């Protein structure tokens, strides 16, 4: 019984913590979140959460101590552990970048030659420098990378950037993006068939949640003369639902629409004479052979 329970490693406290926890909760998995604890069991799903430092998650999953992990791609790339990336999760977006003090009057990559660059990402940085034929020194540090230039530890940094405010506060200017990153779900390469089937059950729910996040449900009233055009304008799962209104000459149209194209489509719908447009969030969305609108 015990060995059917999958252990999911999540960041204990940091950038990914809240959203990792919310994602599990939105999949209907109930876990009591108590910050001081190292692990917690779900009450209605065979899952246990392990709260770890994000830097340790790839290693714990590779070693099979945790079966699954939610961690930034940045650490998956840097740590080079034997794990499977199951899917990206759409949050925790950031990039690993090289930055220099604004006072340096930096012009091009060549200016990095001979500099010492402080980072907690030595592997990724080293690969980038090699690929670009830059001869710089890497100083591996444990944290607080952004202060390295001001305390004389290095002349440049290679660190994660999300809003960019940390760099700005420390007088640093981003010069090169090493890679882009977001949170991802990773799995051990040695899942038992029982645990794999628990993972598959969870993935079914996860897809429903992630798909729904990308889409909105839209309802509107369409005058019959432009109904055909309006239906064509609306992307949908299969095709929009059209129901006649009590008032003659009008129909109600329902469709699912992707957040990316949302405003653009909305403008077109208004131009075509749609009225009473309602837009609602979708909580879960299960799609089989249909593709996302
Ligand atoms: C990263 C990075 C910066 C900050 C940048 O740290 O080391 O300190 O985020 O974010 P900003 O551009 O929005 O200011 P993170 O929170 O990931 O901590 P960690 O690397 O120590 O886990
Ligand atoms: Zn960290």
Image (cartoon, rainbow, N blue to C red):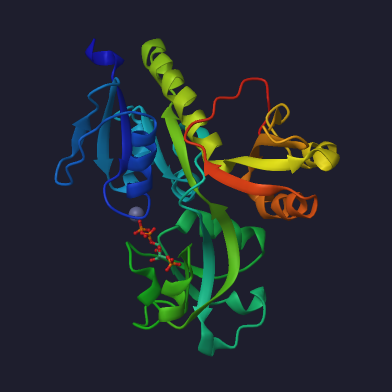
Report the number of discs: 0
Q: Quadrant of residue 118?
A: bottom left
Looking at the image, which residue is at 62% across and 41% down? 218
Q: Quarter of the image for the N terminus: give it.
A: top left
- Relative to 220, say whether 74 is above or below: below
Q: Can residue 265 be seen in the rendering of this structure?
A: yes
Q: Quadrant of residue 245?
A: top right
- Relative to 257, say whether 125 is above or below: below
Q: Position of residue 182 (x, y in %)?
A: 50, 49
Looking at the image, which residue is at 52% across and 85% down? 102
Q: Quadrant of residue 51?
A: top left
Q: Can residue 293 be seen in the rendering of this structure?
A: no
In the picture, measured across the screen, residue 261 lies left or right of residue 13, that is: right
Looking at the image, which residue is at 72% across and 54% down? 264
In the picture, measured across the screen, residue 51 lies left or right of residue 141, that is: left
- Relative to 128, say whether 5 is above or below: above
């Amino acid at each position: 019984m015990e060995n059917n329970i999958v252990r999911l490693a999540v960041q204990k406290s940091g950038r990914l913590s809240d959203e990792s926890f919310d994602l599990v909760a939105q999949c209907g998995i109930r876990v009591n979140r108590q910050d001081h604890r190292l692990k917690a069991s779900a009450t209605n799903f065979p899952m246990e959460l392990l709260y770890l430092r994000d830097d340790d998650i790839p290693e714990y999953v590779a070693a099979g101590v945790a079966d699954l992990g939610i961690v930034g791609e940045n650490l998956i790339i840097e740590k080079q552990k034997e794990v499977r990336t199951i899917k990206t999760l759409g949050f925790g977006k950031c990039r690993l970048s090289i930055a220099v003090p604004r006072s340096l009057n930096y012009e091009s990559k060549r200016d990095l030659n001979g500099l010492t660059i402080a980072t907690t990402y030595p592997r990724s940085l080293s690969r980038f420098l090699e690929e670009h034929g830059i001869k710089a020194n890497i100083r591996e540090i444990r944290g607080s990378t952004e202060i390295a230039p001001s305390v004389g530890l290095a002349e440049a940094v290679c660190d994660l950037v999300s809003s960019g405010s940390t760099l700005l506060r420390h007088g640093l200017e981003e010069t090169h993006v090493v890679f882009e990153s977001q949170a991802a779900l990773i799995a051990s390469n040695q899942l038992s068939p029982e645990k794999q089937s628990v993972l598959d059950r969870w993935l079914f729910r996860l897809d429903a949640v992630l798909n729904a996040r990308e889409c909105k449900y839209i309802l509107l009233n369409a005058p019959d003369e432009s109904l055909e055009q309006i239906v064509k304008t609306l992307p949908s799962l299969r095709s929009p639902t059209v129901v006649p209104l009590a008032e003659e000459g009008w129909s109600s149209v329902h469709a699912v629409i992707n957040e990316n194209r949302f405003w653009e489509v909305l403008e077109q719908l208004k131009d075509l004479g749609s009225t009473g447009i309602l837009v609602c969030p979708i909580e879960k969305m299960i799609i089989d052979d249909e593709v996302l609108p």
